[in-house]
Image (cartoon, grey):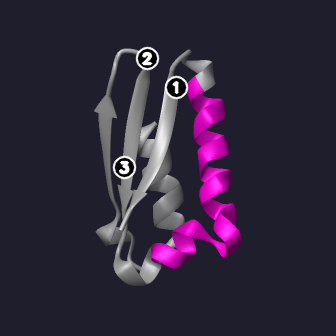
């Protein structure tokens, strides 16, 4: 899941080397934290949060396949 989010985020931003993804695993839920450069934050969130919502939908579909719940947090 971590690699999936990193791949999507690096494709969206201007500074792909500044994309940092960390994963905090729980028993049933894992929290994936995405950190990008300040100037790329708008690209990752998108207009009215559409890009962020799409990334969360993809993450949800992929994590359903492995029978686990994943939450995406975009950190400023």
- N-term-proximal mark, 3 vs 1: 3
Look at the image and say whether residue 47 sits in the magenta stretch: yes
The residue labelled by disc 2 is 28
Separation of residues labelled 3 and 1 (CA atoms): 14 Å
Position in image of residue 60 (x %, y %): 61, 34
In this rendered view, identify the residue nearer to me: 1 or 31. 31
Principal SS element in the magenta part?
Answer: helix
- N-term-proximal mark, 1 vs 2: 2
Residue at 35% from the left image edge and 76% from the top image edge = 37
Instruction: Quadrant for residue 16, please give it.
Output: bottom left
> For residue 37, which numbered disc appears in the image?
none
Q: State which region is magenta.
A: 41-63
User: For mark 1, does the 10 Å Cα neighbourhood hold few (<14), some (14 to 19), or many (20 or more) residues?
Assistant: some
Q: Would residue 17 be found to the left or right of residue 2 on screen? A: left
Q: Under tag 2, what secondary structure?
A: loop
The residue labelled by disc 3 is 33
The residue labelled by disc 1 is 69
The answer to whether marks 1 and 2 mark residues whose Cβ atoms lie closer than 8 Å is yes
Instruction: Quadrant for residue 15, please give it.
Output: bottom left
Q: Under tag 3, what secondary structure?
A: strand
Separation of residues labelled 2 and 3 (CA atoms): 17 Å
């Amino acid at each position: 899941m971590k690699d999936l989010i990193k791949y999507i985020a690096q494709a969206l931003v201007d500074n792909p080397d500044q994309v940092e993804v960390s994963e905090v695993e729980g028993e049933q839920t894992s929290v994936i934290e995405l950190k990008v450069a300040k100037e790329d934050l708008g690209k990752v969130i998108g207009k009215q949060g559409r890009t962020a919502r799409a990334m969360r939908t993809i993450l949800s579909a992929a994590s359903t396949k492995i029978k686990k719940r994943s939450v995406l947090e975009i950190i400023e």
